[in-house]
Image: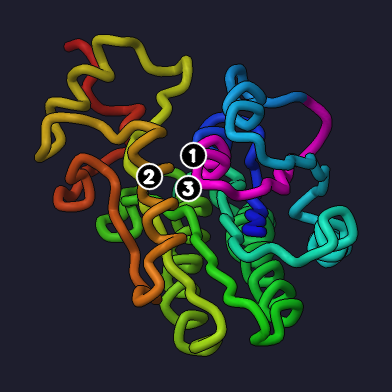
């Protein structure tokens, strides 16, 4: 049996990834930070795929909760995950004038330290007996960072470097790769006209969709000769150096 642990796997981008993996035959251990159900449509996709699914609540800022999660999954399914998707993320507004050490540490705990701990724990569980693949969800800004969301950006840059370093440190038993989306699920802070203008700014004239990102995760999950690689799924956004976060761009003049 193939078993995927997807952090933040019940909602938004995590739900799209989970649904895609279910269709590829993965049983699903879906992590959430608290109570709440699945994204609309996810339960139906999982049921149609006919795979097992269990939900696990854990605060990824709590080292004890992170340490307990792999064993909880193994106890529930009778096996360790064969795929780990580190998708959950903390995202807050700050810049060089407002960022604090406490804020940076809070982002690092969820966006870098928890993925690090989960990767090492699952690698130890696998023990070389079964292959483990790790896919870290990054952000296209790791290449051309701008001045907004400073703590978030730094935490994702660390996770990107961790992707390459752990791929080397854990080979050959574990493969570690990353997917770096661009703007994929605009929040209510965006207006439709702004989203259209942002899409037009991309080299490909389009933004990434949740299905695009989920397809990239599924590809890397099966790419047995690939490790230490980061796949950008961003409409080409990473090829351009934007001065600000997308929320500040493409607004009507």
Which of discs 3 and 2 lies nearer the camera? The answer is 2
- Seen in the picture, residue 128 relative to 2 is either above or below; the reply is below
Q: CA distance from mark 3 to mark 1?
A: 40 Å
- Which disc is residue 20 wearing? 1
Among the two numbered marks 3 and 1 on one chain, the one whose residue lies closer to the N terminus: 1
Tell me the magenta residue range: 17-36
Label 1: how many Cα within 10 Å (few below 14, some 14–19, many 20+): many
Q: Is residue 244 found left or right of 30 in the rendered image?
A: left
At x 57%, y 27%, the residue is 45
At x 74%, y 40%, the residue is 53
- Which disc is residue 215 wearing? 2
Tell me the residue that label 3 is attached to. 97
Q: Nearer the viewer, residue 192 or 118?
A: 118
Residue 205: tell me if it is visible: yes
- Which disc is residue 101 wearing? none
Q: Nearer the viewer, residue 220 or 190?
A: 220
Find numbered disc 2 in the image and state the secondary structure of the residue it sits on. helix
At x 37%, y 55%, the residue is 219
Q: CA distance from mark 3 to mark 2?
A: 38 Å
Q: Quadrant of the N terminus?
A: bottom right
């Amino acid at each position: 049996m193939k078993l995927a642990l997807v952090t933040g796997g019940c909602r938004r981008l995590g739900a799209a990834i989970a649904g895609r993996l279910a269709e590829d035959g993965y049983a699903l251990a879906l992590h959430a930070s608290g109570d709440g159900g699945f994204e609309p449509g996810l339960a139906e996709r999982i049921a149609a795929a006919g795979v097992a699914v269990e939900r696990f609540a854990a605060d990824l800022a709590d080292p004890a909760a992170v340490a307990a999660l792999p064993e909880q999954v193994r106890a529930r399914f009778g096996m360790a995950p064969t795929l780990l998707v580190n998708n959950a993320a903390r995202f807050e507004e700050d810049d060089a004038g407002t960022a604090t050490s406490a804020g940076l540490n809070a982002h690092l705990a969820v966006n870098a330290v928890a993925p690090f701990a989960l990767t090492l724990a699952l690698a130890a569980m696998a023990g070389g007996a079964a292959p483990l693949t790790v896919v870290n969800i990054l952000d296209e800004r790791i290449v051309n960072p701008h001045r907004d969301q400073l703590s978030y950006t730094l935490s994702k840059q660390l996770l990107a470097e961790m992707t390459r370093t752990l791929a080397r440190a854990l080979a050959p038993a574990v493969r570690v790769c990353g997917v770096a989306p661009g703007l994929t699920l605009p929040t209510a802070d965006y207006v439709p006209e702004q989203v259209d203008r942002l899409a037009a700014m991309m080299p490909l004239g389009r933004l990434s969709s949740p299905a695009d990102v989920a397809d990239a995760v599924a590809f890397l999950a099966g790419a047995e000769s690939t490790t230490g690689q980061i796949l950008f799924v961003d409409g080409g956004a990473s090829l351009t150096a934007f001065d600000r976060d997308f929320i500040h761009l493409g607004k009507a003049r």
